[in-house]
Amino acid sequence: MKEILYIEVPTPATESVRAWLQQEFNPSLGEKIPASSGIRLQLRKPTASELAISESQPDLCNELSIFVWTVQRTTYLKVFRWADQPLPQEPQLLHHLTTEIRDRFPNQYPQPPAIDPHQSIFDALMAQYPLTVQHFQKMPHGEYDLRRVYWWEQRWREGVRNPQQPKQVVFRRDEGAGIRAEDDAEMRRHGDTENSIQNSKFKIQNSPPTPHTPHPTPSSYDLIYIGGALGVIHAAVMARLGYRVLLIERLPFGRMNREWNISRSEFQSLIDLGLCTPAEFESLIAREYIDGFHKFFDANNPPQCKAPILHTPTVLNVGLDAEKLLRLCGDKLRQAGGEIWDETEFIRADIDSEKVVVQCNHLTTQTLRSANGRLLVDAMGTASPIAWQLNGGRAFDSVCPTVGAVVASGFEPGVWDARYGDVLNSHGDISKGRQLIWELFPAEGEELTIYLFHYHQVHPDNPGSLLEMYEDFFTILPEYRRCNMDQLVWKKPTFGYIPGHFSVSGRDRQVAYDRLISIGDAASLQSPLIFTGFGSLVRNLSRLTHLLDTALRHDLLTATHLNQIRAYQSNVSVTWLFSKGMMVPTGRNIPPERVNAMLNTFFGILAAEPPAIAEAFIKDRVDWVSFNRMALKAAWQNPSLLLWIWDLAGPADLLRWLRSYLDFTLGAFLSALLHTWFPGFLSQIQPWLEPRFPSLWLWLLAQNYAYTDGIGKTKARGRGEQKAEGRGQKAKGDEGDGEGEGVRG
């Protein structure tokens, strides 16, 4: 008996597929016999010689068995042949079956319905997403949170469908019409290198009349942060350096629709920067695990694409109480003199040569609030209209639509051991054009935080749907972990869009403009594997803080200078091809086991490596030698991998990746030449160079980080950095008002 066809039929209506096979499908040859799960197809009577070969089952030697089953809210079909040798016209029959079933059950990308703002979100979505509505109704703030899910999806879809004409929210207030010549030149230097400048440049227009009358005396700050999740972490650090900081947050401050996991070594950067003490860090830990698992479904994979469980005991092994962390950072921010405006929605920013003026709306009172500052920091994440405007047609190349929930209780004892985390897990093959991946992290008591996500290629016809994912989540959770859905007690949902940008170099994405910079998910500079801005921000917090502090102290706040302050890593950028291989292009049908086969190939190699190598890879610290060695090993072990990647990526993306690889190689070479002496040399010349040539000093600092942190080497904060920050605090104290003073994963 031999399997000769395995395909996915992208519909949850398995009974309809079975009925179609039995009643409508015309194989045009052989005799079709209905069976419980599909059909049997007898092509012709066996010959005497064939009967002799298969005496035990003579009626089956020229028969095909075609059957369907359901898992992951979709349908799968397999065809088995009883004979060892191909039957007459077998390829034609399989092609005919595949073509007919694709025509009858094509790929579909449903859209959420338009809703009346005054209508209950439950009533509006019940017909299309019944399980989502049913379970959100059981959550403490279910109606509010489901509206948030709907809002995020609608905002994301709008940005994906209109990338060339993003909503204009940032304007220039300088005299003259249009964009200045130097602005246009700057955009050409820092804009999208892959698309034409006409399609992608940052269109900062001369400011039109303001639609509201601003406050007559707007408050003044050094830094204005928009977005209170990742934003408050960075804002608190900068406030403790002596800067006047304002944080603007659309939600009630401290509310989170996502939980965070990290390792002790990564969180140490927050302690080193003085944001929290070791004791405060311990108080934030909801659960610490002794191991984390990575395992992908491999029942349908060829032998070379099966893999054991990858154990990573020091990766994402600390589950944080995210809301408690936000509150702690908020307290630190206020103690340092900062302010928080929550339930306040950003409207627009007006930039001139001296300041940026931010206008926003206080949602509870519907009143305008206005503030001006030296620098605006965009930390609004994927929904950021600034990020979309900044990068035009290539705001993001990929995204991970992520849904899930914190379950307070309800799982039977023994379903999961709270000492362990499930870091990456799949329990099935491609489902409706997506390879679904689970994460599970225990928290306090019986709490479990569970996520479901997939890597997705951004496409206007298929932007990626949170609501579709939630319907999948509530349907297939019992397949992933044994449970009675009616017994689960829901604490809160967790959801969001986590974007990715396939960088070719550290200059091909604009993260800043004059007096404006993006951090976290808004900058889209995070790991293509773990794919969260929190981890990337924390790992690069010292780097971002030191560079931004230097820029602020010397008033280096033009796009030229601010675009050097980024969390770009060439060793991470080169791995975008890895995530590309996990995305099924919109409209394509590939073998259902393909993504799991690629994942198991690579994770099997990681499992065979020393634990430190796997940890370095997942923590964005893999070096050039290790990367190349594992890539060659993967190609040797599974030569088909190269063809699979070619099929999914295509020649254009492979050429683009080659440029990323050359950038990584050059960075590794320069790092080998510089890392032993260059940091010490900078410390020696800093007292003379920084006061005289601050712009050159900032560039040299950025290069120093690029060849340490930027290629995966952790750079300890040296005495020179600490002295610079100390001088910055003293200078700010001496200068008084400071108006003219000279960041996921």
Image (tube, helix red, strand yellow):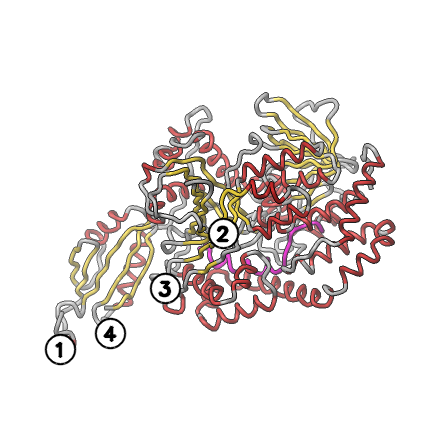
Task: In the displayed orientation, state which residue is furthest to the front.
Answer: 279
Q: Which of marks 3 and 2 is nearer the N terminus?
A: 3
Estimate the spatial distance between the alpha carbons at disc 3 and disc 2, rounded to whole Å.
Answer: 24 Å
| Residue 743 coordinates in the image, percent (x, y) | 65, 46
**Left or right position of 490 against 389:** left
Which element type, helix, strand or loop, lies under badge 2? Answer: strand
Q: Is residue 520 visible?
A: yes
Estimate the spatial distance between the alpha carbons at disc 4 and disc 1, rounded to whole Å.
Answer: 14 Å
Q: Which residue lies under the disc numbered 1?
A: 52
Residue type highlighted by circle 1? Ala
Residue type highlighted by circle 3? Asn
Q: Which residue lies under the disc numbered 4?
A: 85
Q: Is residue 181 visible?
A: no
Magenta region: which residues?
A: 564-585
Residue at 12% x, 77% y is 48
Estimate the spatial distance between the alpha carbons at disc 4 and disc 3, rounded to whole Å.
Answer: 22 Å
Residue type highlighted by circle 2? Gln
Q: Which of label 3 and label 2 is nearer to you?
A: 3
Q: Which of label 4 and label 3 is nearer to you?
A: 3
Q: Dot 3, how many residues are within 10 Å of its Cα: few (below 14), some (14-19), or many (20+)? A: many
Q: Earlier in the sequence, mark 4 or mark 3?
A: 4
Q: Which of 714 and 137 is in front in this view?
A: 714
Q: Which of marks 4 and 1 is nearer the N terminus?
A: 1
Q: Which residue lies under the disc numbered 3?
A: 301
